Every structure is written in structure tokens, then in C-alpha cells.
Amino acid sequence: MVGSIKCISPIDGSVYAERPVLSTDSASKAVQRARKAQKEWAARPLSERIELVRAGVAIVGEMNDEIVTELAWQMGRPVRYGGEFGGFNERASHMADIAVQALAPIEVEDSASFKRYIKHVPHGVVLVVAPWNYPYMTAINTVAPALIAGNAVMLKHASQTPLVGERMARAFHQAGVPADVFQNVFLDHQTTSDLIAGRAFGFVNFTGSVGGGRAMERAAAGTFTGIGLELGGKDPGYVMDDADLDAAVDTLIDGAMFNSGQCCCGIERIYVAENLFDAFVEKAVAIVSGYKLGNPLDPETTLGPMAHVRFADEVRAQTSEAVAAGARALIDPALFPENSGAYLMPQILVDVDHSMRVMRDESFGPVVGIMPVKDDAEAIALMNDSDFGLTASLWTQDIARAENIADQIETGTVFMNRADYLDPGLCWTGCKDTGRGGGLSAIGYHNLTRPKSYHLKKA
């Protein structure tokens, strides 16, 4: 019996959207159509694929007013922030800009005797499994370069944001990308696993939980299917004794609380030099105390609900456990009367340590623990005391000091004097339980293609 996926809106708990999932047979036929269409798509000139992707991106931009309200209903982000088109367009445009160079053959020899070179050829059909927290930006990270590189794409979006894949497919089809080359599909977990296990795809890119990543790897075991995984994070910030305090507080607290803390590279723990600790905490509390928690459709709301009640309940559990173990919660609950269900008040914790889950497990919500540190060595040890490694944010006026510390941190990206940003010119990658592989930049193209060598002896 074919089931369905439901988007339960965090605004009021209603069913905002429901879609039937594909049966195993229908999903297999969709893969077959994609395989057939991909060959003709890859044969098109690279310049044509680039322009069609650019056109699809532009059409998504034309939908933005409708998209902003849909996102509020689907995952709770306040309408005041205007959606994701800025980042969506920046990432897609950068990948389009670098495509000719990134996909150019690597010439080894072109002499009277031999022509030797390496081509970047598409995998075939790429499955993109995208998350709900930044549903457009995370999807486009792979969709745009995969299509440009000559792959067909099947997009499976999170059940919390089902309308995102539909809108993206509609826009790209309207731009001229063939329907079978870019398909939005609704699949349950079992069908997805069965397709991967059956070698339906040349490459799978998954963004989501650690548990979800393990399920992807189990499904692909023995198939030799390439998999890119961006999983959990517990990203640290370190404020050194020479930091610009106001800039550090503003950026790190925004990085911890924006989107109700539901950011892959959001700040989840902060370490502050002892001489700045009290002032940092005082300023942080003042900022967070000024937030307005409420309905994301209200333009005055600065903090919307979390995407689902169970996500909010996990953050509540981590926070209450920490307080029971000796942490102090500094934000007054009286400031946030709507603190129930998916609506979760922000919180700052001090007197925390790494025995507490809130400093170890991914929270993915509007809570952050802040600890004083005596020196760089202690900060490095604490930043590395994590199962995750996505980004780290360093605050100092000394770039040499930052680079020295960066070399010692186990992470995918190091920021200095900024945080919670994805630079499309750099590889988006992680280590440890954060996953493996890399997206965006020229390396993103390398992962979405395979090398093919040509060794041609001339007569």
C-alpha cells in the first residue's frame, strides 16, 4: 500500500501539505527515465547546460514572495528575513561561473606521439536528499553543479518542506531543463534504501542527521556507489583576549540563535578568554532578551517556532539536564510567554562543562553554552572535544595566531571574525561524525563527476 508524507506546520500543528510517495515500481521507472534522459543532457554543450541552470535559478527568484510565506508555514522561519534567494542565487551563480574551468580536461601531453588527458565525466543519475532547515540553499549546493556537470538529478526533499522540491522542479522545467533530467520525487525511507542498494544512482548526496547518514551508508554497502554526507555539527566559537568584543558577541549570538538555532553551521558552544568572559555574557544576554518569539507570519517576530515539536523537546531536555547538573540559565522565561510546543524560548547557559549533553550532542535549537578559557591550548582542546567537525569561528586581531590555531582544530572550515556562512568558493566539507565528501567550489564538481583517462597514441 502506498503511503504519504505529511508536513505538519509548526505554526499551528495543522497538516500544511501532504503528498503520496512513489511505489517501488514507480520509483524504478522514474530512475529509468532519468538514465535515458541523462545521456542526451550530457551531450549538450556545457554552455547550454549552464544557461539553463541560470535561467531556472532566476525563475525561482521570481517566486520568492510566495516562497517566503510557504517557508514560514513549512518550517517556521519568520517572514521578516525574506527567504533564501540571496544565498541560493550566490551559490548557483558561483558554480555556473567556475564550471568551464573546473570541468576542463586535465591535459597531460599533446605531442607528435601521444595525446593524454583526463576528463571529468558525469556519474549519471545523482540522488539529492535535502534537509528542511535551509531547504533551497542546501538543495542548490548539489542540484546546480550536478546538472551543469551533465548528470540527471532526482531530488528527494525532507517531509517538512515538500513544496520546495516542487517549486524547484517547476522553475527548472519552465527554464527548459527536461522533466526527466530533473525530477522531484517523494520517497519513503525503505524505497530510498532499496533504490540505493539496487545501484539506481551513480552518486548520492545526503544532508541530514548522523543516523540518516549511517542508513545511507548501510544501503550503499557493497554497491560502490559514491556518497557525500553532511551530517551533524556542534560548531564552536572562540573569543580571544584581543577580539573585537562587540562584533564577536553580535555575530556569535546571531549564529547561535538565527533560524531558531536550526543551522548546520550554527554556533552551539562558545569559549571566551577569561578577561572578556563577563562582558561577553552580559552583552549576549541583552541581545537575546530583546528577541520576540512568536508567529513567523508576523513581521515583528524575530524568532519563530522550531520546525517540529520533537525538535524543541530535545533542546528542552538538553537544557533541563544541564541545569540539573549545575548550569545556570540566564534568560528570563517571563520574557517569552509563548514558550510551548514548537515555540521554544532562546537560552544562554553558563557554568557548563563537557559532561553535559548540551555541550556535546547536537542541539540544533536556540540554546548556547558559554565557558571561560585561560589560553589557546585550553580552547583548542575543548573545540576538539567533540564527535563533530563542520566549522569553527575564531575571534582575534592576529591572523597568524588564528592560522596557527586553525591548523590544530579538527573541522571542515575555519572562520576568522565571522561565523555561520557558507562560502561557495571554498569546499563545504566536514570530518568525524559530520560526514565526508565536499560540495561547492571546484572540488564540488570533482565529487559530482568521475575522472576518465585518455591515452591516445598517434599513428
Image (spheres, rainbow, N blue to C red):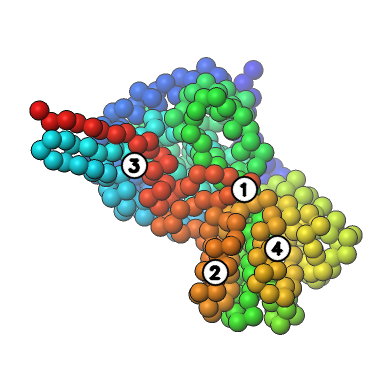
In percent of width and height, residue 174 lies at: 35, 39
Question: Quick one: label 3, few (<14), some, or many (20+) residues within 10 Å?
Answer: many
User: First in sequence: mark 1 or mark 4?
Assistant: 4
Q: Looking at the rendering, in which quadrant would you find the N terminus?
A: top right
Q: Is residue 252 above or below residue 426?
A: below
Looking at the image, do the residues carrying marks 1 and 4 touch, with CB atoms under 8 Å apart?
A: no
Q: Which of 437 and 165 is in front in this view?
A: 437
Question: Quick one: label 4, few (<14), some, or many (20+) residues within 10 Å?
Answer: many
Q: How far apart are marks 3 and 4 (CA)?
A: 41 Å
Report the residue marked by disc 1. 432
Q: Is residue 126 above or below residue 65?
A: above
Q: In this view, does 208 lie above or below 18?
A: below
In percent of width and height, residue 252 lies at: 62, 69
Report the residue marked by disc 3. 148
Q: Which amino acid does label 2 sit on?
A: Asn
Which label is found at residue 404?
Answer: 2
Q: Is residue 98 above or below residue 22?
A: below
Q: How far apart are marks 4 and 2 (CA)?
A: 16 Å
User: First in sequence: mark 3 or mark 4?
Assistant: 3
Looking at the image, do the residues carrying marks 4 and 2 touch, with CB atoms under 8 Å apart?
A: no
User: First in sequence: mark 2 or mark 1?
Assistant: 2
Does dot 1 land on a helix, a strand or a loop?
strand
Q: Nearer the viewer, residue 326 or 129?
A: 326
Does dot 2 land on a helix, a strand or a loop?
helix
